[in-house]
Every structure is written in C-alpha cells, then in structure tokens.
Image: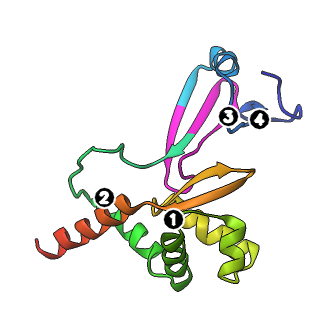
Amino acid sequence: MPSGSGCRNNLGPRRRSSPGLPPGRWQDMLSSTETIIFVPSPHIGPYLMHFAYVPVVRMLFGARLPEGVESSATRLERSDRLVQLRALADETRLRILRHVSEHDELNTQDIQQQLDLSQSAASRHLGHLSATGYLAERRCKGAKCYRVNREHIQHTLHTVAAFLTQ
C-alpha cells in the first residue's frame, strides 16, 4: 500500500485510512504490521476504519453486540443504555424517528426537506441515531437511506422495563 503524504510522526509513516480496502490491499497492509489494536467505538455505526502507522494498525469498529447475543446488565451495559436513552431525549431526533418510521425508508435529503432541518443538523442527528442503533443506514443511489431499527427500539424498551422491575 502506498504511503500517505510522506509525513512522519513519532509513530512512523502514516498510511491513509480507507472505508473499503479490497482483500489484497488488506493483506499488503497487514503483512508489514507488527501490532493491531482494536478500538470499539459507538460513534462510527456499522463502519470499519483503520489508521496505519507502521508497524501499528488501529482498527476502529462499531461497538454493538452481535444479533442474538444475550448480555448481562454490567456497568458498561448500563452506561451504553444511558447513551442510547440520551439519543431519545432530543425532540428533533424523536421527530426524525417518527418520520422515518411513517415512511419505512427515507434518504438524507428527504428527511432534511420534509422536517425543515439544515444539512448540518440533519447529519448530526442522523449520525447519532445511526451510531446508537436506532436507525439502520445503507447506500442508495449515491446517498444514505435510513430505516428505523424496530428490534433495537424494542430491546431498549425491554431493558428499561427490566431495570424498573428489578
């Protein structure tokens, strides 16, 4: 894989991150890697990012439990639920969820126009709802399309109900 701009730092030459490296490029990058550090992040949604500083690669990935995996309510789990509940504590985000739910799936521009949101506000709120799992996103016709993740909403409601009845 070619090096970035030639800049160096104390970690070595930086290699550019890329959202979707082909398998051969991954092999090239990893062949010169001595250490891989996995960093869970609830903020990048369903994406995978990497930052390569030879010989260390940092892999950022969405920090969500795989489908069907049960978890106990650890302190980290409760903290994660608080972050998710805070996502629902915003009127604009609730309006977005209701609107997308009523239309099954909408792209970013439709949400912006129909709810009279600025581009930056729509991007911020949609990113937050996607990162916390309430919206599922996919690429469609060069734009992002969103649909409500009803299972995640049900899981949140179940978790709150279980907490209140302990």
Q: Earlier in the sequence, mark 4 or mark 2?
A: 4
The kind of residue tagged 2 is Glu
Q: Mark 3 vs mark 1: give the one in front.
A: 1
The kind of residue tagged 1 is Asp
Q: Extreme front residue here? A: 103
Is 80 placed left or right of 166 in the picture?
right
Which residue is pictured at 62% across the width and 58% down the height?
145
Mark number, residue 104: 1
Q: Mark 1 vs mark 4: give the one in front.
A: 1
Which residue is pictured at 59% across the width and 36% down the height?
58
Q: Are the residues flagged by discs 4 and 3 in contact, CB closer than 8 Å?
A: no
Residue bounds of the magenta highlight? 37-59
The kind of residue tagged 3 is Gly
Category of crowding for the residue at label 2, using alpha-carbon neighbours closer than 10 angstroms: few (below 14), some (14–19), many (at least 20): few
Occupied quadrant, residue 86: bottom left
Per the model, the C-alpha gap separating discs 3 and 1 is: 28 Å
Which residue is pictured at 41% across the width and 67% down the height?
84
Circle 4 residue: 16
Q: Extreme left residue here? A: 166
- Give the secondary structure at mark 2: helix
Percent of width and height locating residue 103: 54, 70
The kind of residue tagged 4 is Arg
Q: Are the residues flagged by discs 1 and 2 in contact, CB closer than 8 Å?
A: no
Q: Are the residues flagged by discs 3 and 1 in contact, CB closer than 8 Å?
A: no
Q: Earlier in the sequence, mark 1 or mark 4?
A: 4
Circle 3 residue: 20
Is 63 placed left or right of 77 in the picture?
right
Occupied quadrant, residue 32: top right
Mark number, residue 25: none
